[in-house]
Image (cartoon, rainbow, N blue to C red):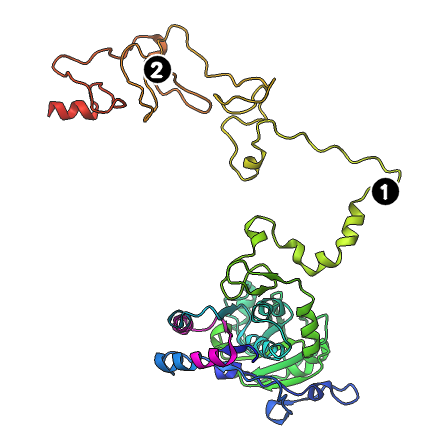
Amino acid sequence: MPTAIAVTSPDLALPAPEPSAWLGQGGVPPSGSWGSTPLDRQTPAAVVLRAPHQQPLDEALTETSAVLEHHGHLVVLYSAACPPEHVRRLHTLRAVLESDRIAILPSALPPLGVAVLARQLRQLSVCGFSPGVLACAARLLAHYVHAGALLGSVTGLDRVEVDLRSHMKSWLPGAHFAVLATPQPQLLHVDRHGTDAGLRPPGFATRLAVARGQLTADWVTSALAPAWQVQGVYEAHLPTESARWWGTQKLIEFAAAIPDPALLSRLVASVRREECGWCGQEVIGDRCAFCAAPLARDRAGGGSAGREPAAIAGAPAALAATAPAPGAPPPPAAPAPDPSGCSTLRQRGLSPVAPAGVPGVVGISGVPGPDGAPQVPGPPQITGVPPVTGAPHGTGVRYGPGVPGVRGGPGHLDVRGPDVMAGAVQRPTAPPPGLTGDPDHPDLRTLPGGARRVAHVR
């Protein structure tokens, strides 16, 4: 059985028309509604996972379990305007069923764009793709969906950047704004009776879905559709999440996408596939849609640039471009490797205390360098000042008079006070009378004021 595709609302389950319904007669794009359009009987229906206030948890568990038993895998799409309690219900179903065969995918598309994307995945579910490839195809196909809306006000729009001038024009009566949310945001102030679209058109053949709200205008069908040269215009019901996504109920939402299932299938099949190292699913892209684990090469730092279609298609040309031309001067020699071995750390922002670029410095003080390399000089000694006794904590070296110590190092500051420079202040070499005894730990100091001596006084 094909992989099931689920949405969060019945108005996001768009019917799939027959291919002959959107091809048109004589090259003329048809228009109409879904009720008057022949439907494709091969496209599976969408599964609707209702909100918590519409369906109890036990019924939702029974329905989801039956879908998994019948289809094997389930891919759930939801928009950013989906209520938080509904999103928690989706994750609750996956957690209670303890199933790794449910992929929950958020989408940055507007609600009508999510509905169009879900219909494309339903069309691809009968093309023989594995569940992992079908779920990952949602991210790929979302880049080919041009979704937007005609709004009567942009005061409540926070998902697309709105400038101050557009905010001020929203208070004018009869103002209309054409907003393109994906793939590249764009906002224009348009004349509702004009014929200029203004929005960037797709570079491929599309079909336009239109959902009308409380705004009355023909700009989408009279100006936008001819400018984008769509192959068909169809009307759908406005999703309930659209007003929340766009910040107003005065809108007409539209979404243009590739209508041909064969073209969608070739587009998905042309992408390189890999196996997820965690759950074993086939993956296209850089992340598994079922377990959200990144690919092994991305975890190792290889990145995903080599898996892009342009990089794969242009690999021979890139290799030819890097080869030197006949008679050209040889390329400059690569810089010598860092003798201190710290170049990798420096690239990660973990440069050593004594950088290798300082003249006469190879590494860190106290660390032997390669053969023949100059050693790192230690801290300067002050003439006439006795050395300060002490040892690092945890070394087991006993403190006391006569024990030589080393102070300072690369990057350390001398904080012994100004009187030390004159040699007037000397550290006591013996404890004051009445405070005898050694500490239990050899690393504890026995000077007056220490924690050990304060305890003895008290």
Q: How many marks?
A: 2
The correct choice, above or below, for 13 with respect to 246 in the image is below
The reply to whether dot 2 and dot 1 touch (C-beta < 8 Å) is no
Residue found farthest to the right:
327
Considering the numbered disc 1 on the image, is that residue within a helix, a strand or a loop? Answer: loop
- Is 232 displayed left or right of 328 in the figure? left
Q: What residue appears at the point 73 percent right and 85 percent down from the top-left corner?
A: 23
Q: Nearer the viewer, residue 29 or 165?
A: 29
Magenta span of residues = 65-93
Disc 2 crowd rating (10 Å Cα; few below 14, some 14-19, many 20+) is few
Q: Which residue is mark 1?
A: 325
Q: Is residue 263 magenta?
A: no
Q: Is residue 78 magenta?
A: yes
Name the image quarter holding the C terminus: top left
Q: Position of residue 441 (x, y in %)?
A: 24, 24
Q: What residue appears at the point 24 percent right and 12 percent down from the top-left corner?
A: 428
Considering the numbered disc 2 on the image, is that residue within a helix, a strand or a loop? Answer: loop
Give the residue type that dot 2 points to: Pro
Name the image quarter holding the N terminus: bottom right
Determine which quarter of the picture holds residue 270.
Answer: bottom right
Give the residue type that dot 1 points to: Ala
Q: Which residue is mark 2?
A: 418
Distance between the alpha carbons at the discs numbered 2 and 1: 67 Å
Determine which quarter of the picture holds residue 196.
Answer: bottom right
Residue found farthest to the bottom:
36
Q: Nearer the viewer, residue 162 or 70?
A: 70
